[in-house]
Image (tube, rainbow, N blue to C red):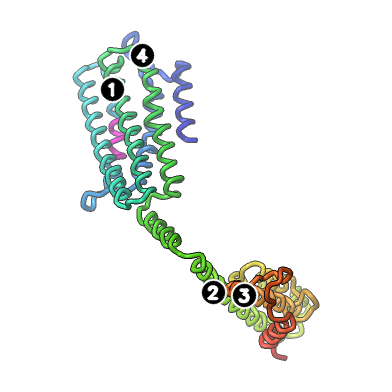
Amino acid sequence: MYMPCCEALSYGLLSSGYGYMKLHGEFHYLPWIRYAAWLVTTPVLLNQVQGMIDIKIGSLRLAPIQSLANLIMIIMGVSAHLQENHAWKWLFFFVGCVMCAVIYYIAWLQFAKVNELYAATKTEIGDKVCFQLKLIMFCFYVGWSMFSVIWLLSSEGLCLIEEHISAAAHIPGDILSKNSFGLLMWYTRWITLGGAWDINKFLEKQAKEKAEAVLTPAEKRKAIMKQAEACFSMADACLQQANTCLQQAMQAEDAEPKGAAEQPAQHRPQALAGHPMENEMLASMGKLSYPLRFDVDQAVTSGTGWKEGNGGVENAIRTSMQKLRRKQREMQYMEKGGDIDHGKGGDSFDSEDDMDREVRLKIDSLRPLG
């Protein structure tokens, strides 16, 4: 949105006549809004080029030099336009051209290095990036060069073309150097490369995709199962840690004097607020994945007791353990190629009684003493 807004403001003021400032002579005007537009848009364009790669000569970074050269180039252009003395005018124009050459040279180093890196990958996406870089370079060099040529031929320079022709000639220059350049840079970075010019990330992504492509379906399934088992183990450990924290909370509350029963927390034995173990307990619950975390978290934050009906912490842990074990059994059964839908004639799991027995043993081991 930045570039279109700047261009709309610039061309709006130029078409209305307010974008010009009358200078010496009857027909000598300064299109100040054009220089102002360059001053606020060219740094953004160069920043996109500099964002591709950081070029250095020794320990000297070239990006700040490029930005400084751009600023000097614009100042020299305005100064040349304001001069009545022809010698000074062409001196300023020459200095501006030298600064433009500096910008071009550093940009060439940046484009060439990025092109070299992606061409060396010998991948389809790498070749696509190289092709798009050529289009970007065309828009950059041709678009920027058009303004110097137009300045030289217009009333600002040799007076070979009239002002309305000069103003019309700036349109394709702006389309190439700003709009087309910006769209190509955006497409290459965000669509082709996924958001970054970093060659290392690109190579890592390519290596990962290549590794996944050679895996058989059975190997992919085994890798997914392994990740799932790791998640289940972490959830089980976090569940036990949460229960330990709850037991400590109850023990600490039982040790409080009787006068503490009048405090607002008297009916919330599992409330975490203000408890010395609050951070550890919250951290333990935060590691549980939904819905395992939800069951225990609901029981704790609601302030219910260890056995208070369906809302108690014991029941919450029981429910979570049932979900955890059932999911583990499903994953193990799927790994053996079984059908987890009992209604489709597949082999059955262990009975629910066996599962409940395991859950009860787990809860007994977690039940607070006393």
Marks 4/1: CA distance?
14 Å
Q: Main secondary structure of the magenta part?
A: helix
Identify the image quadrant of residue 236. Answer: bottom right
Can you tell which of label 3 and label 1 is closer to the viewer? 3
Label of residue 163 in the image: 4
Q: Residue at x 39, y 38 (%)?
A: 44
Can you tell which of label 4 and label 2 is closer to the viewer? 2
Q: Position of residue 367 (x, y in %)?
A: 70, 86
Marks 2/3: CA distance?
16 Å
Q: Secondary structure at mark 2?
A: helix
Marks 1/2: CA distance?
65 Å
Residue bearing the label numbered 1: 149
The total of numbered circles placed on residues is: 4
> Horizontal placement of 224 versus 255: left or right?
left
Residue bearing the label numbered 3: 333
The region drawn magenta spans: 66-73
> Are the residues tagged 4 and 3 within 8 Å (C-beta)?
no
Q: Position of residue 237 (x, y in %)?
A: 58, 79
Marks 4/3: CA distance?
80 Å
